[in-house]
Image (cartoon, rainbow, N blue to C red):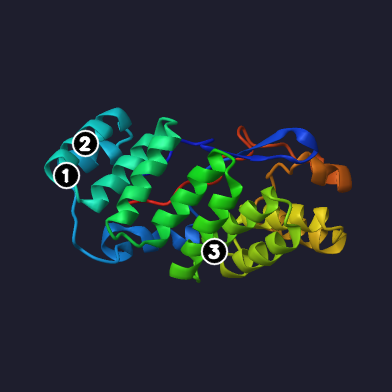
């Protein structure tokens, strides 16, 4: 189950916007199957509800999960899946409400807190996003995408040093993730750490030679704008699988 691409945005420097898609880093993907990521087995969702979610039929998935919840109002997994489906069609306040309900019912999963953080990022509620990512890091400290999400939340609040620390950790855990290198390059550039920013750009190019840099970085490293951008330059990040 993957969110629609171009799901999230994070402010681009100099007043414009940079597309920021909801993400799922390859290094954590295997952790988030139903069997491996759930901290308990108190809840299940029937196949008739989860099948349309997996197939991207989100309106139907919402209808089916509402049916499940009407019969099992304390099914935390159903609330999580319902929130995820709401997010796919842009209903982010409803998405957040369902995630919080799942948490109230006792669900404690790193991917749940990560997706909550990404939802807050979409609404530009960066402090709440930071708090959600911090909890995701506590639950899954070795998952690079949690640190990257935290770095982005710091970045959008202007806390560039903290963003650098988080993005460094993300690149250490998942060195093949171009988005983490890009976040590190931006945060370092904003902190006038041009050497570290350039090193991050070079590592990013090793991972993805065609990654289109933020215009702020292109002002500093204009030669890096010569690579042709992909069709959607920030279509590289996908969300955490809530199954």
Residue drawn at x 19%, y 42% as measured from the top left: 69
Visible in this render: residue 103?
yes
Q: Quadrant of residue 14?
A: top right
Residue depth check, mark 2 versus mark 3: number of the one nearer the observer = 2
Residue drawn at x 11%, y 42% as measured from the top left: 71
Q: How many marks?
A: 3
24 relative position to 182: left or right? left
Residue labelled with disc 2: 66
Residue depth check, mark 2 versus mark 1: number of the one nearer the observer = 2
Which numbered tag is attached to residue 55? none
Spatial CA distance of label 2 from label 3 is: 33 Å
Q: Residues within 10 Å of mark 2 (few under 14, many from 20)?
A: some
Q: Quadrant of residue 234?
A: top right
Residue labelled with disc 3: 144
Spot occupied by residue 189 in the image (x, y as percentages of width and height): 82, 54
Spot occupied by residue 91 in the image (x, y as percentages of width and height): 42, 32
- The quadrant in which the N terminus is found is top left
Mark 2 vs 3, N-terminal side: 2
Label 3–label 1 contact, CB within 8 A? no
Spot occupied by residue 92 in the image (x, y as percentages of width and height): 44, 36
The secondary element bearing badge 2 is classed as helix
Q: Quadrant of residue 121?
A: top right
125 relative position to 46: left or right? right
Q: Front-most of 190 and 134?
A: 134
Spot occupied by residue 145 in the image (x, y as percentages of width and height): 53, 59
Relative height, residue 73 to residue 36 (above, below): above
Residue labelled with disc 1: 47
107 relative position to 75: left or right? right
Residue drawn at x 57%, y 44% as measured from the top left: 125
Spatial CA distance of label 2 from label 1 is: 14 Å
Mark 3 vs 1, N-terminal side: 1
């Amino acid at each position: 189950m993957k969110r629609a691409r171009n799901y999230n945005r994070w402010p681009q420097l100099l007043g414009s916007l940079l597309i920021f898609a909801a993400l799922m880093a390859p290094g954590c993907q295997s952790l988030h199957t139903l069997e491996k990521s759930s901290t308990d087995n108190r809840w299940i969702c029937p196949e008739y509800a989860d099948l349309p979610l997996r197939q991207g039929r989100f309106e139907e998935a919402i209808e089916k999960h509402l049916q499940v919840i009407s019969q099992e109002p304390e099914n935390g997994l159903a609330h999580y899946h319902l929130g995820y489906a709401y997010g796919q069609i842009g209903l982010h306040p409803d998405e957040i409400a369902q995630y919080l309900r799942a948490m109230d019912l006792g669900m404690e999963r790193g991917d749940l807190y990560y997706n909550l953080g990404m939802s807050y990022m979409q609404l530009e509620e960066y402090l709440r996003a930071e708090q959600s990512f911090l909890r995701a890091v506590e639950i899954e400290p070795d998952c690079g995408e949690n640190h990257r999400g935290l770095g982005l939340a710091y970045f959008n609040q202007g806390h560039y040093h903290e963003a650098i620390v988080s993005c460094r950790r993300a690149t250490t855990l998942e060195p093949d993730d171009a988005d983490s290198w890009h976040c590190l390059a931006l945060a370092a550039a904003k902190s006038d750490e041009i050497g570290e920013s350039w090193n991050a750009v070079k590592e990013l190019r090793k991972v993805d030679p065609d990654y289109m840099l933020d215009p702020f970085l292109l002002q500093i490293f204009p030669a890096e704008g010569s690579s042709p951008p992909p069709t959607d330059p920030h279509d590289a990040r996908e969300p955490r699988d809530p199954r």
